[in-house]
Amino acid sequence: KTRSVLAQVSGSRCPRPLKVAPAMSKVRCSHLLIKNVNSRNPVSRRTGQSTEGNSEEAAMKELLDIKAKITPENFAAMAQERSDCGSFKEGGDLGPFAEGEMMQAFWDGTNALKVGEISNPIKTDSGLHLILRTA
């Protein structure tokens, strides 16, 4: 996408539109991922074990149980303890990212949050996530 900006052409009295790329806005979040039988790569990065025996329904129940206990203050510890993403080592922190760098549902879920808020479960091809928006 581009946006039009009026620019004065040297020696001309008429402005003409220029195409300028929009500024890329980045967000930052941590997440807790529970993989399941429907995950595109059903192997936990935390345990190295297959998650093919974990139904999506069981994963959702577990994630909702975690959601009832998780807070911004204990999010990192809970992600280290349970997340199936390799980011578990960093307490689920994914660092800054822009649109197009994550799956669209994950991007949309992150952007729907205010900084410090935790999402309801978000489903992507990777599995089910809780997202904590951090920036």
Image (cartoon, rainbow, N blue to C red):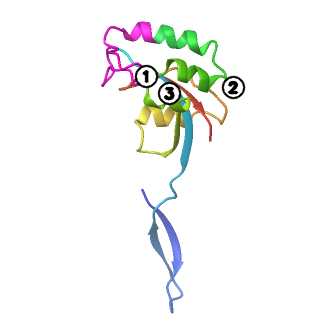
Disc 1 secondary structure class: loop
- How far across and down, in percent of the image, does residue 15 sit? 51, 79
Q: Which residue bears the numbered disc 3?
A: 88
- How far across and down, in percent of the image, does residue 126 sit? 37, 26
Give the residue type that dot 2 points to. Answer: Glu
Residue at 51 percent across and 83 percent down: it is 14
81 vs 68, left or right, is left
Q: Which residue bears the numbered disc 2?
A: 73
Residue at 60 percent across and 26 percent down: it is 76
**Alpha-carbon span between mark 3 and mark 2:** 15 Å
In this rendering, which labeled residue sits more in front, label 1 or label 2?
1
**Alpha-carbon span between mark 3 and mark 1:** 7 Å
> What is the quadrant of residue 56 in the picture?
top left
- In this view, the residue farthest toward the bottom is 11
Q: Is the residue under label 1 in contact with that under label 3 (CB below 8 Å)?
A: yes
Disc 2 secondary structure class: loop
Q: Earlier in the sequence, mark 3 or mark 2?
A: 2
> What is the quadrant of residue 75 in the picture?
top right
State the residue in front, 74 or 107. Answer: 74
Q: Which residue bears the numbered disc 1?
A: 46
Say if 10 sits above or below 2 in the image: below
- In this view, the residue farthest toward the right is 73
Give the residue type that dot 3 points to. Answer: Phe
| Number of residues whose C-alpha sits closer than 10 Å to that of mark 1, classed few (under 14), some (14–19) or many (20 or more) | some
- How far across and down, in percent of the image, does residue 68 sit? 62, 12
Disc 3 secondary structure class: helix
Q: Earlier in the sequence, mark 1 or mark 2?
A: 1
- How far across and down, in percent of the image, does residue 102 sit? 42, 39
Disc number for residue 97: none
State the residue in front, 55 or 104. Answer: 55
